[in-house]
Amino acid sequence: MQEFIQQLINGLSLGAIYALIAVGYTMVYGVLQLINFAHGDVFMVGAVLTLVIARRFGFVTDEQVTRSWLAFGACAVLSVVACGLLGYVIERFAYRPLRNRPRINSLITAIGISLLLEFGGQHPRAFGPTPRPFPVDMLPGVKQDLARIGGVVVTRIDAMIIAVTLLLMLALSYIVLRTRTGLALRAVSHSFDTAALMGVNINRIISFTFVLGSTLAAAAGILYAVKYPKVEPLMGLLPGIKAFVAAVFGGIGNITGAVLGGLILGLVEVLAVGYLPNGSQYRDGIAFVILIAILLVKPSGLLGKNVAEKV
């Protein structure tokens, strides 16, 4: 029983990260009916850029690491803001010109941007192809255990990931449900034409959606790098795909469903590794098994609704 509870804690920590990424996918789809496959690479940029900023300001060198939560937080905030701007640039110059074109054009563009970020990041003048350690040591005491209850260990890293995710989800809920911008966002996701007739600036709301989703992806990338302290330009590939599966599983376009899907995916993945023979060899395939199953049984996802389309 203690081992099961321990696996649940580990799964919630991983699932919280998937949930943050999945929310970005589902928000963009809810507004534009577009799968932004570059989203997983914004996740990567958030982690990589935090390391780059820390080294540029001298907090991390080959000889020593500045142990300061404030310094790490400043680097993380700068990285998140930069990723928000990246999300705006992607929407403004890649997706907006194609908004009235066939949807397949935007999908191909999304794949192209994803490849550009992945392989552009491997250029020697950018980050390079070699994985580098993430400066977790900037966070004093983060590797220590927060609590021990019997044989169950709650690490400070897992507690931080769950707490930050919860705070971000509360902030997102407030923005979407309690602000005028959130009201406009919900109106645009319902109908472009009706929202425009009510005076909503469609372009501004869509850009805001990309910025918000990108900041959540960047935060997820930083948390992921704290949990698994190694960064490289291809690190967002698998987490991004898994988060997309989580969004589909929960009901693409439904924020609550994306969070639920991310948590379930994280739990299932960790439990499979813990209890299946050679489970670590199958952990990356579990997401795709879930995707196939949900598409066969309930294509709209757990909380999604079937919508009839005219053809």
Image (cartoon, grey):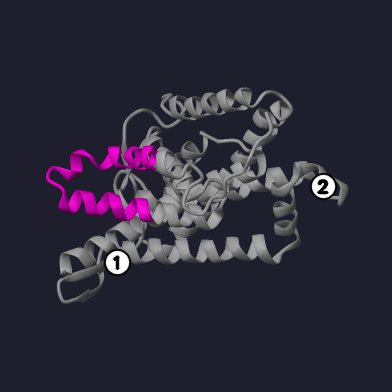
The location of residue 183, given as percent across then percent down, is 73, 58
Q: Is residue 293 left or right of residue 275?
A: right
Report which residue position mark 1 lands on.
Answer: 141
Q: Are marks 2 and 1 in contact (CB under 8 Å)?
A: no
Give the residue at x 39% y 40%: 291
The location of residue 214, given as percent across then percent down, is 56, 45
The correct choice, above or below, for 6 with respect to 81 in the image is below
Determine which of the numbered discs, if any, sits on residue 67 in the image.
none
> Which of 256 and 71 lies nearest the eye of the viewer?
256
The answer to if 290 sits in the magenta stretch is: yes
Dot 2 falls on a residue whose secondary structure is helix
Callout 1 amino acid: Gly
**Residue 153 in sight in this render:** yes
Q: Residue furthest left?
A: 277
In this view, the mark in front (2 or 1): 2
Q: What range is drawn magenta here?
A: 264-293
> Which of 122 and 273 lies nearest the eye of the viewer?
273
Q: What is the crowding at mark 2: few (fewer than 14 residues within 10 Å), some, or many (at least 20)?
A: few
In terms of image quadrants, where is residue 91? top right
> What's the CA distance linking mark 2 and mark 1?
52 Å
Callout 2 amino acid: Thr
Give the residue at x 45% y 63%: 164
The correct choice, above or below, for 51 with respect to 259 in the image is above
In terms of image quadrants, where is residue 83? top right
Give the residue at x 71% y 24%: 101
The location of residue 120, given as percent across then percent down, is 47, 25
Who comes first in sequence, dot 2 or dot 1? 1
Predominant SS of the magenta segment = helix
Report which residue position mark 2 lands on.
Answer: 194
